[in-house]
Image: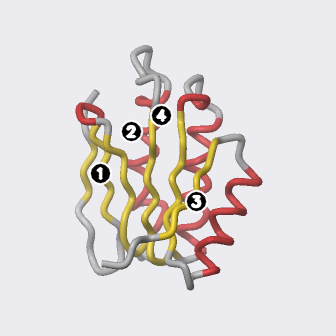
Amino acid sequence: MEALHIEASEDTPKIYFEPDVEIYLLEGKSLPENAIDFYQPVFDWAQVFFHAKDVPSTIVINFKLDYFNTASSKQIAKLLRIIETSPSNENVTIKWYYDEEDTDMLKAGNRYNKLMNIQFEFIVNKES
């Protein structure tokens, strides 16, 4: 399976999905001008990856988002729905990172957790 790498910009997150080394990461800010267009390659990749016959037995997707707008929220939900409805959804754990004082990011993760039948883990970011 091909990797998917999208470099971060001022308004878009880094997307690093690398099946060969089993790293799946969304990191940074997500407030693209057109969230649907930005996330479409991610949806296309996820549709293929999560429906493949050789999906890994354990998949950890790391959400390390600092901020996302409403349009991005809908696209994140769409990505999670693709995962949830795939045959490999029981293999997936979402690790949702947040800053201890950022209750909005924790609440957002909890909303997704309640809406989706996917395992979530909530992790406080370590101070650097």
Decide: is 112 above or below 47.
Answer: below
Q: Which mark is residue 57?
A: none
| Front in this rendered view, residue 71 or 50 | 50
Residue drawn at 40 percent across, 48 percent down:
42
C-alpha span from label 4 to label 1: 16 Å
Report the mark closest to the observer, 3 or 1.
Answer: 3
C-alpha span from label 3 to label 1: 20 Å
**Mark 1 Cα shell of 10 Å, populated few (<14), some (14-19), many (≥20):** many
Disc nearer the start of the sequence (4/3): 4
Instruction: Locate residue 119 relative to residue 115 in the image: left or right.
Output: left
Residue drawn at 44 percent across, 71 percent down:
125
Amino acid type of the residue tagged 1 in the rendering: Tyr
C-alpha span from label 2 to label 1: 11 Å
Q: Which mark is residue 45?
A: 2
Q: Residue furthest bottom?
A: 101
Image spot of residue 68 (x, y percent): 51, 74
Residue located beneath label 3 in the image: 122
Image quadrant where residue 4 sits: top left
| Front in this rendered view, residue 90 or 68 | 90
| Number of numbered tags placed on the structure image | 4
Amino acid type of the residue tagged 3 in the rendering: Phe
Asked if the residues shown at circle 2 and circle 4 are in contact, with their CB atoms under 8 angstroms apart, the answer is yes
Residue located beneath label 1 in the image: 16
Q: Quadrant of the C terminus?
A: bottom left
Q: Residue furthest top?
A: 53
Q: Quadrant of the N terminus?
A: top left
Asked if the residues shown at circle 3 and circle 2 are in contact, with their CB atoms under 8 angstroms apart, the answer is no
Image spot of residue 119 (x, y percent): 63, 43
Residue located beneath label 4 in the image: 47
Amino acid type of the residue tagged 2 in the rendering: Trp
